[in-house]
Image: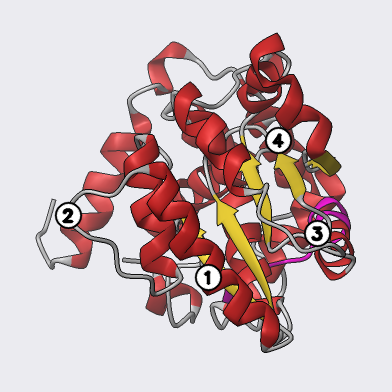
């Protein structure tokens, strides 16, 4: 690929939530501060929402890494679970053995015993659920009932919900008004502006091992902002494709035409007038990449 060409150790714009690439955007830092403060004060329900691709899962992983040692964490990455499956998932995370069939009452007794044992060790239990907008309605209610477990002074189980804006829509329904009233802290992630994108892409290149002048100019980052709307995931996709184009032409920097072609080739990207390219060039992205691959393989054209 283009690693040797740009002098980097690894691909800087992959879509996996690698915490070593955590940049610390103001919005993400604020959300992390809210989460840590709320958890340390013993709040029951905390919610973080953000559009698709804004880095919720990365923030979730960062939170798991940043929590002090007196927190015992349980992490549910896929909440498309029935109430029984959710109970089993929570039990597994808390190292509680359940029989082949267990009703809600038996589960509550076993979980409460485990939570009390952890509490007596001066630890707090935090249940973190990613993609919480996908929780089925009856599972959402089962989750609310879990948080009824408490001592006279504090909750035995704290819950952090990470979800898309659809989570707010779900919680706005009258059926979930009891759960909504228990959410004491919430935060909505913001999108990046052009200046933040410039710093973001430079940071990721640096983490990957790049040590030369910026590959992405402020002008290119303006175009990245217009094409991505400030969504980190789309920025990553566009940057990866732009680097491929620059590599294919043997350039050390990305030029505006690379961003335009990358945006044209990406369904999720916006294509305002400032990003439009002539129809004759629409196929250039694929042609350029094919030429680069053939050249890299030593095939003459």
Does 24 lie within the magenta span? yes
User: Which residue, given by chain and number where applicable, does mark 4 sit on?
Assistant: 223
- In the image, which disc is placed on residue 230? none
User: Mark 2 or mark 4: which comes first in sequence?
Assistant: 2
User: Which residue, given by chain and number where applicable, does mark 2 sit on?
Assistant: 100
> What distance separates the C-alpha of mark 2 from that of mark 1?
19 Å
Depth check: give the residue in front, 132 or 8.
132
Quarter assignment of residue 82? top left
From the viewer's perspective, is 265 left or right of 19? left
User: Mark 2 or mark 1: which comes first in sequence?
Assistant: 2
> What distance separates the C-alpha of mark 1 from that of mark 3?
26 Å
Depth check: give the residue in front, 246 or 189.
189
* Residue furthest left in the image: 299
User: Mark 1 or mark 4: which comes first in sequence?
Assistant: 1
Quarter assignment of residue 216? bottom right
| Vertical relation: 260 (above or below) 196 | above
Q: Position of residue 250 (x, y in %)?
A: 43, 62
Start-end of magenta stretch: 19-31
Q: Position of residue 53 (x, y in %)?
A: 57, 40
User: Mark 1 or mark 3: which comes first in sequence?
Assistant: 3
Q: Residues within 10 Å of mark 4 (few under 14, many from 20)?
A: many
Does 178 lie within the magenta span? no
Quarter assignment of residue 90? bottom left
Measuring 70% from the left and 35% from the top, which residue is drawn there? 223
User: Which residue, given by chain and number where applicable, does mark 3 sit on?
Assistant: 35
User: Mark 3 or mark 2: which comes first in sequence?
Assistant: 3
| Vertical relation: 253 (above or below) 169 | below
Indicate which label's residue lies in the foreground, 4 or 3: 3
User: Which residue, given by chain and number where applicable, does mark 1 sit on?
Assistant: 113
């Amino acid at each position: 690929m283009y690693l040797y060409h740009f002098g980097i150790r690894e691909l800087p714009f992959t879509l996996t939530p690698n915490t070593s690439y955590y940049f610390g955007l103001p919005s993400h830092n604020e959300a992390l501060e809210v989460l840590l403060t709320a958890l340390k004060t013993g709040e029951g329900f905390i919610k973080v929402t953000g559009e698709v691709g804004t880095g919720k899962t990365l923030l979730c992983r960062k939170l798991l890494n940043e929590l002090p040692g007196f927190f015992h964490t349980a992490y549910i990455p896929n909440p498309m679970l029935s109430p029984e499956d959710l109970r089993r998932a929570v039990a597994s995370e808390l190292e509680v053995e359940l029989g082949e069939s267990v009703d809600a009452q038996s589960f509550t007794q076993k979980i409460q015993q485990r939570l009390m044992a952890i509490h007596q060790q001066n630890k707090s239990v935090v249940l973190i659920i990613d993609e919480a907008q996908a929780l089925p309605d009856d599972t959402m209610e089962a989750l609310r009932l879990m948080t009824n477990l408490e001592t006279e002074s504090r909750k035995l189980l704290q819950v952090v919900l990470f979800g898309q804006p659809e989570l707010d829509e779900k919680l706005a329904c009258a059926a979930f008004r009891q759960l909504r009233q228990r959410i004491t802290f919430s935060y909505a992630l913001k999108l990046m502006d052009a200046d933040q994108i410039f710093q973001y892409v430079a940071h990721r290149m640096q983490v990957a091992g790049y040590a030369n002048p910026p590959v992405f100019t402020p002008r290119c980052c303006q175009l990245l902002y217009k094409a991505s709307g400030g969504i980190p995931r789309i920025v990553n996709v566009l940057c990866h494709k732009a680097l491929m184009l620059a590599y294919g032409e043997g350039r050390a920097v990305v030029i505006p035409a690379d961003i335009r072609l990358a945006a044209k080739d990406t369904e999720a990207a916006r294509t305002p007038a400032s990003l439009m390219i002539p129809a004759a060039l629409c196929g250039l992205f694929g042609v350029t990449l094919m030429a680069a691959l053939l050249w890299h393989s030593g095939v003459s054209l």
